[in-house]
Image (cartoon, rainbow, N blue to C red):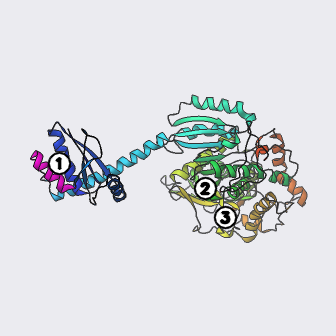
Amino acid sequence: MAKFVLAGRADCPYYAKAELLADYLQKNLPNFRIHKITQHPDVWEEWLKNVCEKNKWSHKNSPIIWRELLDRGGKGLLLGGYNEFLEHAQLYYNVTSSMTSELMLIIAQENLEAHTEKELEEEALKGRINPLQVWISSASAPACYHLIPILTSGEVFGMETEISITLFDDRQMEENLKTIVMETYDLAAPLLRSVSMCTKVEEAFHQAHVIIVLDDSIDKEVNTLEDCIRSRVPLCRLYGYLIEKNAHESVRVIVAGKTFVNLKTVLLMRYAPTITRNIIAVALGVEGEAKAALAKKLKTTPSNIKNVIIWGNISGNNYVDLRKAKVYSCESAVWGPPHYSRPVLNLIFDSEWLNKEFVSNIKMLTATGKQFGGILAAHSIATTLKYWYHGSPPGEIVSLGVLSEGQFGIPEGIVFSMPVKFENGSWEVLTDLEDTEISGPLMTRMAHDLIQEKLVALGDVINFQLHQSGTDLDKTNETGISPITDDNQEDQKPSNEHKDSIYSDIIQDEEKNLSDVEFLNLIPQTIPEKSSSQEPTYDAEGKTTEH
């Protein structure tokens, strides 16, 4: 039996002509067999070089044809290129090819398209063989329960992407995690390859492609704002170390929660410096609350309101900017097609409601995050991930907490919520937006708290210093920026009382959530760099051991 191997560049017309001749011979000769190999033009030369070196051949063009010695074994016998194969067919089988040059070029183009399509199918198959690894930290939080069905539906990562979910939490939450794992399996979701739980810190985030950081509980009592801020550092340091050590190099980290979202994000960036741009904070929860309040006033649905911008601290001192906000399908004297929109500020004539009731309601909802429940948190996280992977709607503004590089006059080095768009698997700050300037005093006030949180967390200052604000905020309201927290109410308290009024609810919530968490006992006192040979070691129970 004669077995020939025909290999060539996918867009080579001579390969196309030799392929057609080989197919004819295989169809008409019972003992003639052909095996075809096509390579993309970008990799052809390297592939040919490797084959020739392996077999000690000398050949430089496409195609290359050799005969496999089925009866004797050993390396193949080089026949040559197209001309040699044509001569062989004519000499041994009295068959030749009459294909025209025009037809050769057409088939060559079809071969390239078919080869490209096959490569894409193989990549999709690899995605099924190696599913997307999704890790959820603090997985016993209510948001996780609502998030899992969305992640497994295909809405977030795509209908062709299988995922494996790992729930990560403290060992004390093991029973809760087992319940969630069982219920997740009961979903029988087609795109869910597996779901598992992890309570061993040293194994956390292994080969993770996506890490969702939810609210964490604290294992020690917090009585002051400064203690509350500093309590975030050990866990973020541990997470940063584990991400650098265990996660996939292209991992994407999304931070959500009710308190200190910006602070946790910037700390993760500090302790996982190689993936700084791939760590973001979710701001769509605050944006959703603002849209809901506006929709109720305008007698429409929240989904009809677009381009609300959240500036500043996602879970603290921030502002809702309505200057770019639009509303679709709103009942008014002027109607239009579905794509017709009107500025929100042109339809709300009740300035007293906008500057007082709207501001106070949003402040009440977001000051402590009490209304940022599981459903809203899950939807905000899932939507942000969906945009990150597939792009945000064209022309739509999305609020996102990212590391400032000085855009809009924001101080560098803090995580600040600002307008972005998602495109091609990444995000981009919309620095070219018009009429989005923020006054200096307002910007200073928003940035001050974030800078102070970072300084207190890192031990650069002992006490949180309050910003002494002026009267510019009330003037700012008239320009279309609606504050979420307002230090300048007529009933403003003295500084110490005001400090307590902002954060007392946060501290109370922390005390309610106190548990004997073992995570923080496992944190190395000094986190080495990834390149260092020193790593923390753990005993059988997952606790650190002394060296």
Residue shown at 76% from the left, 58% from the top: 317
Displayed quadrant of residue 269: bottom right
Q: Is residue 440 magenta?
A: no
* Disc nearer the start of the sequence (2/1): 1
Displayed quadrant of residue 62: bottom left
Residue tagged by mark 3? 404
Q: CA distance from mark 2 to mark 1?
A: 52 Å
Number of numbered discs overlaid on the protein picture:
3
Rendered image: mark on residue 278: 2
Answer above or below: position of 529 versus 211: below
Disc number lying in front (2 or 1): 1
Front residue of 401/330: it is: 401
Q: CA distance from mark 3 to mark 2?
A: 14 Å
Q: Residues within 10 Å of mark 1 (few under 14, many from 20)?
A: some
Quadrant where the N terminus sits is top left
Amino acid type at circle 3 is Ser
Residue tagged by mark 1? 21
Rendered image: mark on residue 119: none
Point out the stretch of residues depicted in magenta.
Answer: 80-97
Label 3 residue SS: loop
